[in-house]
Image (spheres, grey):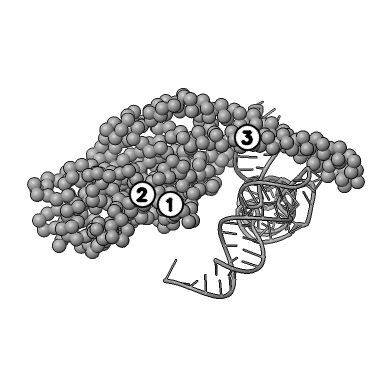
RNA sequence: AGAGAGGUGGCAGAGUGGUCGAAUGCGACGGAUUCGAAAUCCGUUAUACCGGCAACGGUAUCGGGGGUUCGAAUCCCCCCCUCUCUGCCA
């Protein structure tokens, strides 16, 4: 959620930012928030004044009662009765203005950073750099959904039987590869200075609001109605919410956490060839990195996170590219997002395996995640996160790119983690 | 899940209708003392919002919400959470 102070003091920048996102009714919505804010403040001033008078009278009545002056006390009560009605009315109007203002603010996406390119869709994203070399595959190369059958390492039909489509069962070398990748990613994150955490994978409503999944993206999460809990779509949600309603001592900054969790996405409305095999699932594994930094350090932190993810792809010997997302393709809460994609050789397409975002104070504002700045002033922190990495598409690329007549050759770095160096029948 | 107890400031812990944002202790910070330190002494020690250039003033917050009252940490109702015992269970 954007801060009102930003809307007020940097209106032009906000409008320009919303335009970059192709937000349709920017001018009207921003103006509406500012109007509501003015009304809200006027209400609050009146309310506080009436309340102050009522408090003072209550004190006087207390004194009169103590000295036995019933009549004097009763005389004052006619005024407090009036005030009571007033206060109630002011409080109602204040609450209404606040509610409307919050609802409007919930609608406004984060303001893109200056470096974010304009654009409407994924086609307008900017390729920042590429790494690795695309392999030359023989004509009879197989896509990963054929390879997993050939080597019997992932079974979609079994998943369908016990749960439903999009819940694969990993078997044998496939299961061990999952475990190896998780361990590899966690070890790399730890070596890069991230503390490992194991959060719950069900979160409450407040956490959903904290990181911005609620109220808008309700339909993307699995919901347990009996206890009003949500299955996490990413460990960003629990790990970032660890710091909700906190004032973090400055010496603990920056916060750097990493965690592995399964992730759950309903992906309502997605279908077609794009979602074959491991390309899109309802449940998948992901290692996440999260940073919480002082505002002046978040841009630099963001770059180190991208570099870290890149280093993973390099060690996995996968061809990749780094994209800077355009205003139209960026997530609602982000101010700058880099996507990292790997080349899936048999599908001949790039697959997104990581999204590294700086949310600046947008999440922190909802989370009330703050620190004490110089001079003792509490100030919102910046939150950042990135996948490091999401497993299924990594597996897809590893399988496709490294297929040989003798089996799937695995990158060196995984050999010790897996306990084998190639996948074979 | 059943029975009981309880949720107060960074922590511990008083406070059962009135000047209580809240005693006291600990911790932390600043200062005095000291060659330095310990001990001791003095002071400070929450968050949010509103008004104000500021100093400062006001309002709210004692798990959350609602109610009674001129006035609620304190009384009433609902919800959440924690602890103990019983049950169940990895």
Residue at 90% over, 43% down: A69
Asked if the residue under mark 3 is in contact with the one under mark 2, i.e. CB atoms within 8 Å, the reply is no
**Left or right relative to A11: residue A419:** left
As rendered, which of A423 and A157 lies closer to the eye?
A157
Q: Mark 1, chain letter? A: A
The relative height of residue A15 versus residue A200 in the rendered view (above or below) is above
Label 3 packing within 10 angstroms: few (<14), some (14-19), many (20+):
many
Give x and y (percent) for residue A144. 19, 51
Say which quadrant the C terminus of chain A sits in.
bottom left
User: Residue A61 placed where, x, y %?
Assistant: 83, 42
Q: Chain of mark 3?
A: A
Under tag 3, what secondary structure? helix
- Using the image, tell me which numbered label, if any, was put on residue A223: 1
Question: Quadrant of residue A15 in the image?
Answer: top left
Contact? badges 2 and 1 (CB < 8 Å)? no
Q: Name which of mark 2 and mark 3 comes first in the sequence.
A: 3
Q: Is residue A112 above or below residue A310?
A: above
Query: Is residue A188 visible from the viewing direction of this image?
Result: no
Mark drawn on residue A94: 3
**Mark 1 → mark 3, Cα distance in angstroms:** 33 Å
Q: Which callout, 2 or 1, points to the residue nearer the camera?
A: 1
> Disc 2 designates what residue?
A265
Q: Do marks 1 and 3 share a subunit?
A: yes
Q: Name the foreground residue: A185 vs A377.
A: A185
């Amino acid at each position: 959620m954007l801060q009102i102070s930003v809307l007020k003091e940097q209106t032009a920048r906000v409008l320009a930012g919303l335009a970059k996102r192709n937000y349709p009714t920017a001018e009207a919505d921003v103006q509406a928030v500012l109007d509501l804010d003015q009304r809200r403040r006027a209400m609050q001033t009146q309310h506080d004044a009436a309340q102050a008078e009522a408090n003072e009278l209550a004190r006087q009545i207390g004194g009169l009662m103590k000295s036995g002056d019933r009549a004097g006390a009763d005389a004052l009560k006619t005024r407090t009765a009036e005030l009571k009605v007033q206060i109630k009315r002011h409080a109602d109007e204040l609450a209404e203005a606040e509610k409307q203002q919050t609802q409007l603010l919930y609608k406004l996406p984060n303001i893109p950073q200056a470096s974010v390119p304009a654009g409407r869709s994924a086609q307008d994203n900017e390729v920042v750099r590429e790494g690795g070399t695309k392999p030359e595959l023989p004509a009879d190369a197989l896509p990963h959904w054929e390879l997993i059958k050939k080597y019997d390492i992932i079974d979609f039909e079994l998943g369908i039987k016990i749960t439903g489509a999009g819940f694969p069962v990993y078997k044998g070398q496939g299961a061990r590869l999952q475990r190896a990748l998780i361990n590899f990613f966690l070890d790399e994150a730890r070596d890069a200075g991230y503390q490992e955490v194991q959060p719950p994978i069900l979160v409450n409503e407040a956490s959903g609001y904290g990181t911005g999944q609620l109220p808008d993206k309700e339909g993307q999460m699995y919901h347990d109605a009996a206890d009003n809990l949500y299955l996490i779509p990413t460990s960003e949600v629990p790990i970032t919410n660890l710091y909700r309603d906190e004032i973090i001592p400055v010496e603990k900054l920056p916060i750097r956490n990493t965690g592995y969790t399964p992730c759950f996405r309903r992906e309502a409305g997605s279908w077609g060839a794009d979602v074959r095999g491991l390309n899109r699932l309802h449940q998948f594994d992901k290692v996440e990195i999260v940073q919480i930094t002082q505002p002046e350090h978040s841009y630099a932190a963001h770059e180190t996170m991208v570099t870290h993810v890149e280093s993973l792809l390099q060690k996995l010997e996968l061809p990749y590219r780094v994209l800077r997302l355009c205003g139209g393709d960026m997530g609602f809460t982000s101010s700058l997002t880099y996507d990292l994609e790997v080349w899936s050789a048999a599908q001949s397409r790039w697959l997104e395996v990581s999204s590294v975002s700086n949310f600046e104070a947008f999440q922190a504002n909802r989370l009330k995640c703050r620190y004490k700045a110089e001079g003792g002033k509490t100030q919102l922190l910046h939150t950042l996160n990135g996948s490091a990495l999401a497993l299924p598409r990594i597996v897809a690329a590893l399988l496709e790119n490294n297929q040989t007549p003798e089996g799937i050759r695995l990158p060196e770095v995984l050999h010790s983690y897996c306990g084998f160096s190639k996948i074979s029948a």
